[in-house]
Every structure is written in structure tokens, then in C-alpha cells.
Image (cartoon, grey):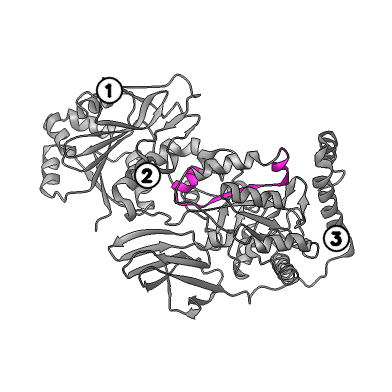
Amino acid sequence: MTSKATIVFAREASILDLHLARLAEFFGIECRMVRIDGAGNLGKFLSHWENPPCIMTSARSLAVLFQEDAISPNIAAHLFERVPFVFVYGITPGAQETYAVRHLTDRVISSVVSFDRSEHFYQVGTTERDITNEFSGLAFGPIDQDIDFGLVLDQPQTRFSTFVSINNLPFFAALKKQTSCIFFLACRDIADLESQTNGSLSAHKYFSRIIPALMFLRHVFQEQIWHNPSPCANFIIDDPLLRKSYGFLNYSRLSEEMDRVEFTTTIAFIPWNYRRTRASTARLIKERSDRFSICVHGCDHTAGEFATTEVKQLNTQTRLATQRMRAHEQRTGVPYTEVMVFPQGRFSTTSLGLLKSHNYLAAVNSTVIPEDLGEEHSLTVADLLVPAISKYSGFPLFMRRYPREVADFALDLFLGKPVLLVEHHNYFKNGYDIIREFITQINALSKKLQWTTLGELLNNTYLQKKLSQDTFECKIFTNRQVIHNPEPIERQYIITKYEDNEIPIKRVSVDGRQYPYTIEDNHFRLYIDLPPKSAIEVTIGYSNAHYQLAREAQSLRRNVKVYLRRYLSEFRDNYLCRYDRLLLLVDRMKNRHFFKL
């Protein structure tokens, strides 16, 4: 089974060619780079022809090939008609590139044009869902008029399919020929996966530079490309107490909406509140454990409590948060998931290592930039393309989003990430229509999407690719992962996980029994055979032995400050939030440091 693509270039490989090769290899497809700069090279290439599943070439290289004196344009065009799938990228309005594309399509594409303004949107079609997948039917933007262009057709063609258009002009499209299908992308750039980011990944910013190329590769290589076989979703609400109502949130009303439009909710619960849960609400959470779950939201929920780099303090805070959550579980019968949501989104790289040593499953956060690194965070595009960021102590940090742009969640699903939404109680100020409408849009993105508890979501989020008929490789991210074999045949699974060896592994088990593993080149690896239609759970236990606890007890002054903070926050959420002018006044006082909530 081959998972190799061929990039053909003229004279020398361009930055665009190298970026595409890096993108393909990042998603599991090996790239062979072939230079053709004359009849001799072409003859050598054809003599070693291996029937590649696809050839990819830039419009610039295509133009050079068509202008070679020793190669006739017809012979060069014939080269691309011998391959099942061809991808022509980097198409711009340049005269030579336009000539090459026009010749390759037998004048079906007559010209390439720029757009006079950036207010245009990407419009994704619905007729080729096997290619456009989760983006099908979406319109979003704005486009980047400096790199995005439109293809002009000489006349309508039944053999021509438009996947993405801009201002009613094809932007990403394909032309079917007798023995091949040629894809065209009118974008002058392919994203550099090593480039620095601002810690976010938005659909409108990265769509044209990443997604069409991946749509092509996924269409060609199917299961041989890294993909998430079990996309899951969960809606997280930060802060509320487990009482009948908190602010604008009513648990019974939310339960009805979850049944009505199919979604699940996790409450990011503040451990400090572990003795304040009402029995009736605990009973509702337990009875609806298919819909509700809770996770850990800090410890005291004070500003920056997990943003420090003081190891003893973080170790103490983490242990105290865990003890409180266990006490809450014993007192109420409501189980919790060992997943951390950081208060105000603030955390340090050190805190992630501590959570790993305490065997937390993951951290889920609205921001992914550690406070101790700031602008020196060095998060690249590649770091943000995977389901979880694991570069800090090998501990998974999952990004969640506010329910704003549906296209951003389509991007997450397309890349194999889970759908993780976040809001606060005030999201329900005007009722539940807003969440109902947004969840309906999310559910329309994929028929495979499953709403689960947060723990199940993380236990089932991994990437896999097919190596042979009965062998798959899996990239896991959390320390507890359920691997599925849904097929009626036995399969071997090669399971890998990034480990920087900072936190030592204490034990590895499969379905509770100790299992052998290796660590090589900072990657944990184990091999296991799964019977037909079965699943196994891989558990990695880490050691906390080399971390010490802070000896000093919490001072009375600190305890009073935490007490005041919690009750003032609740007063704001339950009462002030209903009076906009009063809430505005409080915000102004807070900004002037009269007090902090």
C-alpha cells in the first residue's frame, strides 16, 4: 500500500513546493520531489514511472515546462493525464501561468483574475461532500485578496466541478478528463507550518493556504492520511455552582435543550465550592450522566493561581484541588473528570508538568499560550493543527472556542480535533434559542459527530492512519486512550505518544494489565493486536515522587480574600448581571482596582 505523492517542479523547488511537501508529510503522506528541466529529465522520469496515485505541481513550474524548447506543450500536458489525480497549485493572474492552465484545460479555464476588495467570502459547495467534508455549504471570510484569486471559465462545462468559489468564480475546482482528474487552486501561498502564530487558528485566516491542499490529499489517500475516526463534541460552562439555577443558567432547562437538539454539557466546577452543591441538582446530574459531567476549574479560582512557576505551590494547589473534587464526589455521588480548565485561562508551562505528574487526563483552555513564555511562546502552525498541543512536558492542552464562527468548528473537525465549546451563565441571558440554533449548525457539519461527556471525548480523540490492510498507526494524546477496531478482522495497532521524559512513566497497562512498551526519540510506542469489533484502553501512569508540597499553611488573610472573591463573584452573577448599569459600574470599579472579582 502506497502513501506517497510526487511533486514535480521545474529547475528548482520553490518555497511553495517545500511548504506543500511539509504539509503532506505532516499529515502522513511521504512526498517525492522530482525535477524536470528538459527532455532528458522528462525521459528519465517516464522511464522510472511507478504509477503514482497523484502528481502535484505549481502553476509556475507548469508554465516553465510548457515553455521548454525541448518539450512540446502537448507532451508535457500528456504527462499529467497519465495520473489519476493531479493538483495544480499557486495559480495567479500572471500571463505565463494563465497560459499554462489554459492549455492544460483545453481552454476551459480562460483566465485568472484578482479581486478588487477583501470583503468577499469563501463559498463552499454542497455537491462534492466527499471532498469538501465539514466545510460543505458554509460561507465565511473575509478572503485574503493578496493571495486569493478567481478562475474564469470560457463556458460552462459538465466536466468541471467547483468546490470553493469567491464572488461566484471558482477558487478551488477540478476538471475531469478521460483518465485523470485535475484539481486547480487559485492561491499564491501554502502555509509554512514552522511559522509563528498568535496562538489561534481561525478558518478565514488559514483556509485557503491549508484546507484545499488537504482536501485533495484526503480525497486521494483516504485512510492513509492522519484522521480522527471518532469525532466528538462537548459544551463547557465555566464557574457555576451546582444549584437549581446560577445566574441565567437553569439546569433543568438546559437538560431539556440537550435532549431537544442533541448535545452534552460539562460544568467546569470550582473545587473551593465542594461543600456547596445542592442535593437536588446533584441528583439531576447523576440521573442525566449521559448529558452532564463535571471537570476541575482551578482550585480556589483566584487570579493566576496556575500561572506561577513555583513548583511547590503548584503541586500543593493541584493536590488540594484533587482532594476537594474527591470529597465532593464522595459527598454528592457526582463523579468528576480529571481535566483542568484554568481560571481566566492563565497557566504556566510548569503547571502542565504538574498536572501530568498527578495523572490528569488533559487541560482544556480558551488560550494556549503559557503566561511564563508570553510572546516567546514559539507556537507554530504545526503545533495548532493537531488535536492537542503536547510540546510542554508532553501533556495535552486542548483548545476550546466560544460559539461564534461555525467555520472555525468546521476547521477543527476537518483537522481531526474535537468540538469544544465554552461559555458562561450569561450566554443564556436571552433564553436558550441561541444555543439551540448554534448546536443545530454544529450538528449539520458532520454525520459522524458524537456528543459525549468530556472524559469520553478525550479518551476517544486520537489520530490514525492505515499502513496496510491489517495494520494501523495511532497517535494518542492523553494518558488514558480507548482504541477501537470496528472491522470484522483482527488488526495490529502501533500506538505512539510524544514524551519528553521530563515526567517519568511509572506503569503502562492495557485493559488494566501491565504491558510492555518502548521509548525512542521522545516517543512512547507499543504494539497490540485487536480482535475483530473490539476496543482496548491504554493507560499510562506517571510518577509524582520528585515534587514537594509547599509547607506553609494558607494564611487567614488569604482565606478571607478567597471567600470574598467567591461570594462577590456569585453576587455579580446572580444579581448584578440583571442590571446592566450596575454591572457596568462594578466593571469600572474593578478596572480601577477598587477590588478584583
In front: label 2 or label 1 = 1
Report x, y in % for residue 450.
50, 54
Q: Name the residue under label 3.
A: 558
Within 10 Å of disc 3 (Cα), the crowding (few <14, some 14-19, many 20+) is few
Residue at the (49%, 59%) spot, across then down? 461
Q: What residue type is labelled 3?
A: Arg
Assign a secondary structure to mark 1: loop
Q: Give the range drawn in magenta.
A: 410-430
Q: Name the residue under label 1.
A: 156
Q: Which amino acid does label 1 sit on?
A: Pro
Measured in 3D between alpha carbons, the distance from the residue under mark 3 to the one under mark 2, in whole angstroms, is: 52 Å
The number of discs equals 3
Measured in 3D between alpha carbons, the distance from the residue under mark 2 to the one under mark 1, in whole angstroms, is: 26 Å
Q: Mark 2 points at which residue?
A: 214
Measured in 3D between alpha carbons, the distance from the residue under mark 3 to the one under mark 1, in whole angstroms, is: 72 Å
Assign a secondary structure to mark 3: helix
The tag earlier along the polypeptide, 3 or 2, is 2
Residue at the (35%, 42%) spot, across then down? 131
For residue 116, the mark is: none
Q: Which amino acid does label 2 sit on?
A: Leu
Q: Per the image, is 218 magenta?
A: no
Q: In this view, does 187 lie to the left or right of 424?
A: left
Q: Classify residue 587 by image quadrant.
A: top right
